Image (spheres, rainbow, N blue to C red):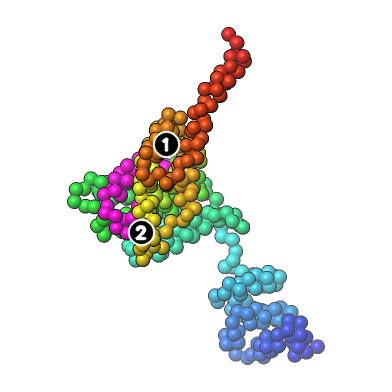
């Protein structure tokens, strides 16, 4: 069977006469210039299949060189993954860009990215920083595939260092506003800087949670909470300042979640203190946010996920119910006397407190009787 007949046979098999015609031209090409014959990735892939079937190593090499060098659309990439692995060693260079990367290279790019993502570059680079943050979170996410990076102690140490530097810059800005008698949060430059820090800190919480190293951040946020609230309350309630308050609540919700669900253990005094600082602030700020959301043209900017409000409310309840009963009574009394008692709704905590308080003597007396029986004098 001559070449033309064999090409005809292959054309029947793959159902693509034009691809087979290209193979004929390639076999008869004299000057070796084939760059104008490919007509795209799909066509080159078809030519490659025919060339492999015909046993034409020069054409196979030309196809491989082309496919290895050009960009692919997503659909083309999926087709390449279906076809090329069956073609053996000669076609392997095509798949070079899809091969797993060694752990050392992954660590290097992660470290570079986390340093950039927690830095404070010029405003023009914010889009680049946001993109880096998204990819870092993706690298650590377990979905259909395992996380790209398994964080060891060195990685965790690097992340902590980056977060410490970010929090140090935030704290310097906070102290300057807290101590200044002339500067206020409402000034344009301060608004932009403070909002940038809070946005980064909110993102950092996601990374620290994935790495299970939230403790230091929770301690930092606890120590700074009173200053943060004081500075936020100084600002005139413009849309921009209310947006900053919203970002602060987002960070706080993640900190409180770590406390409320036992991921970070704090002593009773600190848990009570964090409630006394943030519960009144959230209670007063939510109506402001709701009002701006309803009336402002930029309402979408201030839209906080409804699930986050629900989660924050549940977290408050969890933290309250883990306090000693006397401290619970103090928090609930303040809530019942407050005009902003609608949010957060602490009804569940109130109901549990009432039940526990009513049955406390009976329950504890039963425990006392059992203790006396099992431990006779």
Q: Residue 61 shows which numbered tag? A: none
Query: Does residue 347 appear in this view?
Result: yes
220 left or right, relative to 29? left
Q: Residue 332 shows which numbered tag? A: 1
17 left or right, relative to 112? right
Instruction: Please say if 149 is above or below 359.
Output: below
Q: Position of residue 48 (x, y in %)?
A: 67, 79
Q: Residues within 10 Å of mark 1 (few under 14, many from 20)?
A: some
The residue at the point 60 percent across, 76 percent down is 67
Question: How many numbered dots are placed on residues in this image?
Answer: 2
30 left or right, relative to 353? right
The residue at the point 65 percent across, 70 percent down is 81
**In the image, is residue 295 part of the stretch drawn in magenta?**
no
Q: Main secondary structure of the magenta part?
A: helix
Q: Position of residue 115 (x, y in %)?
A: 41, 55
The one of 251 and 356 positioned closer to us in this rendering: 356
Q: Residue furthest top?
A: 377
302 left or right, relative to 11? left
The residue at the point 51 percent across, 49 percent down is 210
Q: Residue furthest right?
A: 1
The one of 202 and 62 positioned closer to us in this rendering: 202
Element under disc 2: helix
The one of 149 and 334 positioned closer to us in this rendering: 334
Quarter of the figure with the C terminus:
top right
Query: Does residue 172 appear in this view?
Result: no
The residue at the point 53 percent across, 26 percent down is 359
Residues drawn in magenta: 216-245
Element under disc 1: helix
Residue annotated with mark 2: 292
Q: Position of residue 139 (x, y in %)?
A: 52, 57
Quarter of the figure with the N terminus:
bottom right
């Amino acid at each position: 069977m001559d070449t033309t007949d064999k090409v005809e046979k292959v054309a029947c098999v793959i159902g693509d006469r034009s691809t087979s015609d290209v193979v004929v031209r390639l076999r008869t090409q004299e000057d070796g210039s084939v760059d104008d014959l490919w007509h795209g990735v799909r066509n080159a892939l078809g030519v490659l299949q025919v060339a492999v079937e015909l046993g034409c190593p020069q054409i196979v090499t030309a196809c491989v060189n082309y496919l290895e060098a050009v960009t692919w659309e997503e659909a083309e990439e999926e087709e390449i993954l279906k076809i090329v692995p069956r073609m053996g060693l000669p076609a392997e260079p095509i798949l070079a860009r899809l091969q797993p990367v060694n752990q050392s290279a992954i660590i290097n790019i992660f470290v570079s990215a986390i340093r950039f993502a927690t830095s404070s570059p010029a405003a023009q680079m914010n889009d680049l920083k946001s993109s880096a943050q998204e990819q870092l979170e993706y690298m650590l996410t377990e979905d259909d595939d395992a996380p790209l990076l398994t964080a060891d102690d060195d990685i965790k140490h690097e992340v902590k260092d980056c977060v410490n530097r970010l929090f140090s810059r935030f704290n310097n800005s906070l102290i300057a506003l807290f101590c200044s008698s002339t500067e206020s949060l409402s000034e344009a430059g301060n608004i932009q800087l403070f909002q940038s820090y809070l946005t980064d800190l909110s993102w950092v919480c996601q990374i620290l949670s994935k790495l299970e190293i939230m403790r230091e951040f929770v301690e930092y946020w606890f120590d700074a909470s009173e200053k943060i609230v004081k500075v936020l309350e100084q600002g005139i309630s413009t849309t921009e300042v209310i947006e900053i308050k919203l970002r602060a609540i987002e960070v706080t919700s993640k900190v409180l979640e770590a406390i409320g669900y036992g991921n970070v253990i704090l002593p009773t005094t600190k848990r009570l203190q964090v409630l006394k600082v943030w519960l009144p602030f959230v209670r007063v700020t939510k109506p402001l946010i709701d009002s701006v959301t309803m009336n402002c043209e930029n309402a979408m900017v201030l839209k906080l996920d409804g699930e986050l409000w629900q989660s924050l409310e549940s977290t408050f309840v969890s933290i309250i119910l883990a306090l000693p009963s006397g401290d619970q009574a103090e928090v609930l009394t303040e809530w019942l006397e407050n005009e902003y008692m609608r949010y957060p709704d602490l009804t569940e905590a109130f109901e549990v407190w009432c039940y526990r308080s009513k049955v406390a003597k009976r329950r504890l007396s039963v425990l006392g009787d059992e203790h006396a029986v099992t431990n006779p004098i």
